[in-house]
Image (tube, rainbow, N blue to C red):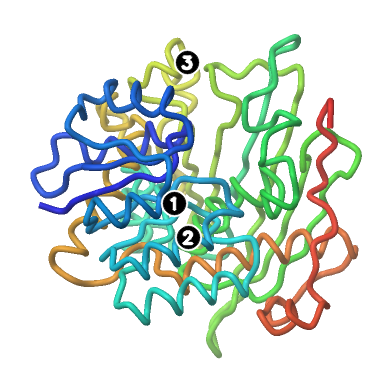
Amino acid sequence: MLRVGFIGLGAISHENVLGYLDSPDAQIVAVCNRNRETGLPWLQQYGLTEAKHFTDYREMFSEARLDLVEILTPHHLHHEQAIAAAEAGVRGVSLQKPMANSLVECDEIIAACAKHNVVLKVYDNFVFYPVYVKAKKLIEEGLIGELMSIRVNTMAGLAEGAAWPWCFQADSWRADLKTGGTGPLVGDDGFHKFSLARWFMDSDFEKIGAWIDADTPLDAPAFIRGKFKTPPGAGPKYAQVDFSFSPRMVLPCDFWLEDFVEIVGERGIMWINLCSAAGDRKLFAGNQMSESAVFPPIAVFVGGKITTYLEDISPPERNWSTSFVASTKHFIQVLQQGGEPVYTGEEGKEITRYAMAAYISAQENRDVMLDEITSETEQAGSLKIQSNFCNLPGS
């Protein structure tokens, strides 16, 4: 039985905890946050009455004898906490994305984990979502032929008069370039979108160009285009990652983001709809869009005909939380049986580079080659993000 600890008990912890509840292979034995008044109710909420609460993660490492730690804290804390976990002998570190605020810090985390024989995972749940997994399988079976391009479209809305979501508020650490490292959409949420594009196209980016509106509250609207690396003789592959923001659009759920994916192949086109606001999750109760025949989980146009997939998927399976559970179970399996996690530290650093390239492109108004985004150029001072493009009310 793996002994598990959590550092950070914010909103995302309520997703990350799900894969450990009732697990026969792992048990949460300790948690850490700065406030016992919120930490103890968190433990009670999930029936973890025997787990111990700490306010100092170093003390937790010293006393709890952990096998695995989930680091769910603001980005600027990842570097220090991940290295401390490695030095404390924790076998597996599951680190929230993006893994750090600089490439040098990414390198130091990777090196510390390698030195102490620690399995490092940079957390991503998107590639474990059942609908995406099915879409990937259909593509690998050749349904739409050799892939040519992918578009990931994230729409953000806010009912007129509604309060800003917690992660977009001016006093949030996400809005501060020093603590967030980038912006809340292109940089933070963008990790998932760049990851998804890379995973479907099975290739790393070679070049990225971006336009991010500098006069709106958030780092959106943003339109990011990319070209993938391809081997000699292969056709070119492209990506478009879009972030819209409609401050008077009421999304059909109590969430403020929704994703739609379009993948173009030589033989056809695949659309993946409602990638998070579907299923039986209470947060999305009353989402008529997910019940509409216009938005099946997957629709494919091949041979002049439309075919839909997963229309019979159960609400619990389509629930976005299933992707968190599957990602956690995968890492538990890696620690028990060997293998590599999704994603390794090196892969986490690679995806972090994409968001950095997008911000540099937008601030310098030019395309950026990925070989410009390196630890060496960062140390030399030629790679520096000047702004997260956010002008949140009250900031």
Location of residue 150 (image quadrant): bottom right
Residue at position x 45%, y 10% in the image: 286
Q: Nearer the viewer, residue 201 or 271?
A: 201
**Image coords of residue 378 (percent x, y):** 73, 76
What separation in Å lies between label 1 and label 2 (alpha carbons)? 8 Å
What separation in Å lies between label 1 and label 3 (alpha carbons)? 32 Å
Dot 2 lies on which element? Answer: loop
Dot 3 lies on which element? Answer: loop
The residue singled out by tag 3 in the image is: 287
Task: Left or right? Give the position of 14 relative to 375.
Answer: left
Can residue 214 be seen here? Answer: yes
Amino acid on which disc 3 is placed: Asn
The residue singled out by tag 2 in the image is: 267
Residue at position x 22%, y 41% in the image: 20
The tag earlier along the polypeptide, 1 or 3, is 3
Residue 378, placed above or below residue 77: below
Dot 1 lies on which element? Answer: loop
Mark 3, other Cα within 10 Å: few <14 / some 14–19 / many ≥20: some
Residue 205, placed above or below residue 281: below
Q: Nearer the viewer, residue 288 or 271?
A: 288
**Image coords of residue 64 (percent x, y):** 24, 51
CB atoms at circles 1 and 2 under 8 Å apart? yes
Mark 2, other Cα within 10 Å: few <14 / some 14–19 / many ≥20: some
CB atoms at circles 3 and 2 under 8 Å apart? no
The residue singled out by tag 1 in the image is: 303
CB atoms at circles 1 and 3 under 8 Å apart? no
Residue at position x 59%, y 48% in the image: 152
What separation in Å lies between label 3 and label 2 (alpha carbons)? 33 Å
Amino acid on which disc 1 is placed: Gly
Residue 305, placed above or below residue 162: below
